[in-house]
Amino acid sequence: MAQTAQPFSHRIHLAAKLECSICHAGDNQLAKQSACLKCHKTAEIGPPIKTRLARFDHQLHLKLGNVAPLIAAAIDKKTYLATPAPDLRAQLNTQNPCEACHRGLEVSDRQDPSGLPQMADCLVCHNQIDPPYSCEFCHAKDAKLTPVGHTPDFLDTHTTGTLGFDKTTCAVCHGRKFHCLGCH
């Protein structure tokens, strides 16, 4: 009988004072089973969670140093393109440059999307937004990027006022300077 994959705990690995780069090396920095076998006899863990990125250069971003202060400054200046979680500002008090974008890993016992960077984090520096043309610079062409609220009838229904639509939530994809009349 085949064993099921065990959940991966960043909390346990970070508590052991392991550097992120020990496991996350190579293309796109996703851990490979061979990295687990360096310390474990068997690697009965599941595959890494899928991302919607086509490419990302962690090494280049790590050369920039810790970007947590930049994200914190954007929140303070109200230029962060999303409503920050109530504890986000406190989470950015980190010396680990990986945890600037991969927050909450020190308490995470499972792989889930909450440990992945949020689009608003990326847009602190990469702020040239021109959807749909700028999306494919980082995201795969087949990545599902549209929000769940963008139903097939979205173009007809979002202007009715019945959806309780908050235009500020549009900023992550459309930028702060977009105007409804730009499309209508």
Image (cartoon, grey):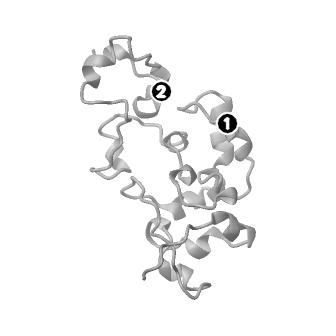
Name the kind of residue labelled 2 in the image.
Answer: Thr
Q: Quadrant of residue 167?
A: top left
> Residue 31: x percent and y percent?
51, 71
The reply to whether dot 2 and dot 1 touch (C-beta < 8 Å) is no
Name the kind of residue labelled 1 in the image.
Answer: Ala
For the point 74% across and 42% down, the residue is 90
Which structural element holds mark 1? helix
Which structural element holds mark 2? helix
- Around disc 1, counting alpha carbons within 10 Å, would you say few (fewer than 14), some (14 to 19), or many (20 or more)? some
Q: CA distance from mark 2 to mark 1?
A: 20 Å
Image position of 15 with respect to 129: above or below: below
The furthest residue to the front: 1
Q: Which mark is residue 99?
A: none
Q: Quadrant of residue 155?
A: top left
Q: In this rendering, does residue 65 appear at all?
A: no
Q: In this rendering, does residue 159 appear at all?
A: yes
For the point 27% across and 14% down, the residue is 184
Q: Quadrant of residue 85?
A: top right
Tell me which numbered mark, 2 or 1, is placed earlier along the sequence: 1
For the point 59% across and 51% down, the residue is 101
Give the number of callouts: 2
> Residue 83: x percent and y percent?
58, 30
The answer to whether 144 appears left or right of 106 in the picture is left
The answer to whether 129 appears left or right of 121 in the picture is left
Q: Which residue is mark 1?
A: 73
For the point 35% across and 48% down, the residue is 137
Q: Could you say which is closer to the camera, residue 1 or residue 159? A: 1
Q: Which residue is mark 2?
A: 169
